[in-house]
Image (cartoon, rainbow, N blue to C red):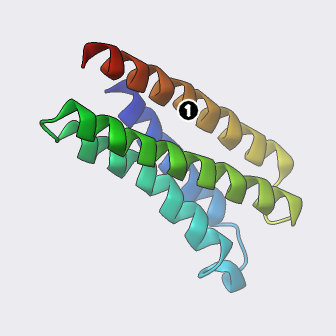
Amino acid sequence: MLVWKAAVELAVACYGATKAFPPSEIYGMSSQIRRSSTSIAANIAEGHGRKNTGSFIQVLRVAQGSLKELETHLILAGRVGLMPENAMNVLLRDADEIGRMLRSMVRSLQKRS
């Protein structure tokens, strides 16, 4: 699935971006960004493994929630100076694309069921 691959790549990029955060953020913003970014791909995979379309849609919506959480953390990290604005914008652009893919997948599954 393209959306899962894109979500994995976003999580990898988020891990790379948070490596530059100060050690004081290891349990703060760094942890929040890493956790929410990995949650997106993990939820897509979990939903794909379900046999029920309704359950798949539900888990994709959880992934959308994790994506919005990640976007908020990225904006905050940029606003407080933990991340350069250009790095934040690249990650937000990728997140936006994944959001569009998730919405499209949910619509497609809803039509099918």
Q: Quadrant of residue 76?
A: bottom right
Q: Camera-side residue: 81 or 50?
A: 50
* Residue 113 visible in the current orientation: yes
Where residue 101 appears, as percent x and y from the top left, is: 48, 25
Measuring 51% from the left and 53% from the top, which residue is drawn there? Answer: 37
Query: Total marks drawn?
Result: 1
- Is 74 situated left or right of 104 in this image? right
Identify the image quadrant of the C terminus: top left
Mark 1: amino acid: Gly
Q: Is residue 1 above or below residue 68?
A: above
Measuring 75% from the left and 47% from the top, which residue is drawn there? Answer: 88
* Disc 1: CA contacts within 10 A as few (<14), some (14-19) or many (>=20): some
Measuring 59% from the left and 62% from the top, which residue is drawn there? Answer: 33
- Is 65 situated left or right of 19 in this image? left
Where residue 28 appears, as percent x and y from the top left, is: 65, 78
Identify the image quadrant of the N terminus: top left
Q: Is residue 42 above or below residue 47?
A: below
Where residue 12 appears, as percent x and y from the top left, is: 49, 50
Measuring 53% from the left and 49% from the top, which residue is drawn there? Answer: 65
Instruction: Give the labeled residue for mark 1.
Output: 99
Furthest-left residue in this view: 51
Q: Is residue 80 above or below residue 108?
A: below
Q: Camera-side residue: 83 or 69?
A: 69
